[in-house]
Image (cartoon, rainbow, N blue to C red):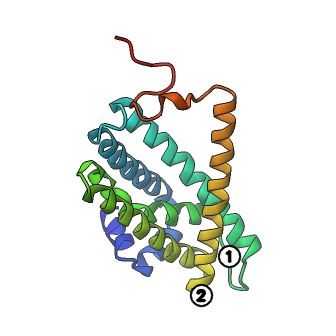
Amino acid sequence: MLNRMLGAIRLDVHTFEDVENDSGATLQAMLVVVIVSLAGGIGTFLAGEASLVWGIGGAIVRALLFWALWAWITYFVGTRLLKAAETHANWGQLARVTGFAQTPSVVGILVFIPFVGPIIAFAGGVWAFVAMVFGVRQALDYTSIWRALGVVAISFIIVLVILFVLLIIAVVTGLIDPSQWGNGQPAGEGDAG
């Protein structure tokens, strides 16, 4: 698994091809998502922006949901909207390559370092986006990196819109209290003291 993670960081197309074709690697891809979100949750906690439980636990749950949703939407966009003649893929293949493509975001653990930490974390996110483009190109059997970039960009926008709508619904229904944002605690655990 570590070699595959390193291959994803190096944007190695053989790694993405290997992951795509190994149906047993779906659990590994899920573990990569958990590791990356754990790193980001720890970094957020160390930065004082979240409690330990909500920072890490919440990061893992959000990352797994985001990964599954983005993989499904990427599958749909890539096999329906921007399908090429050579495209033959299933959700599992997209889930595996998109999971491993998140590896560069593990640097999110450094977000707590003043000034440079957020820049490093952002760069890791950009690198993960690029890795996703390479992975999607392999999973969807595209010959064009530009078609893969289009699929990833369109999918990302769709996921952001869905997440924004869900956030609005959660705020309107009272599931999330925006007045608690930024204090490191979920809604309902206000300052007792």
Q: Residue furthest left?
A: 113
> Which quarter of the figure has residue 53?
top left
Residue placed at 63% from the left, 82% from the top?
147
Q: Which x, y percent locates residue 14?
A: 43, 80
Q: Which residue type does callout 1 highlight?
A: His
The mark found on residue 63 in the picture is none
Select label 1 or label 2 by which is in front: 2
Q: Is residue 99 visible?
A: yes
In the rendered image, residue 143, in percent from the top left (x then y), is placed at 59, 88
Against 10, residue 118 (above or below) is above
Q: Residue furthest bottom?
A: 143
What residue is rendered at 36% in x and 68% in y? 4
User: In which quadrant will I find the N terminus?
Assistant: bottom left
Q: Amino acid at mark 2?
A: Ser
The image position of residue 172, as x and y in percent, is: 69, 31
Image quadrant in which you'd find residue 32: bottom left
Is the C terminus in the top left, top right, bottom left or bottom right quadrant? top left
Is residue 40 depicted above or below 88 in this figure? Answer: above
Query: In the visual, does 115 lie left or right of 183?
Result: left
Q: Name the residue that disc number 1 marks.
A: 88
Residue closest to the eye, 192 or 74: 192
Residue with the mark numbered 2? 144
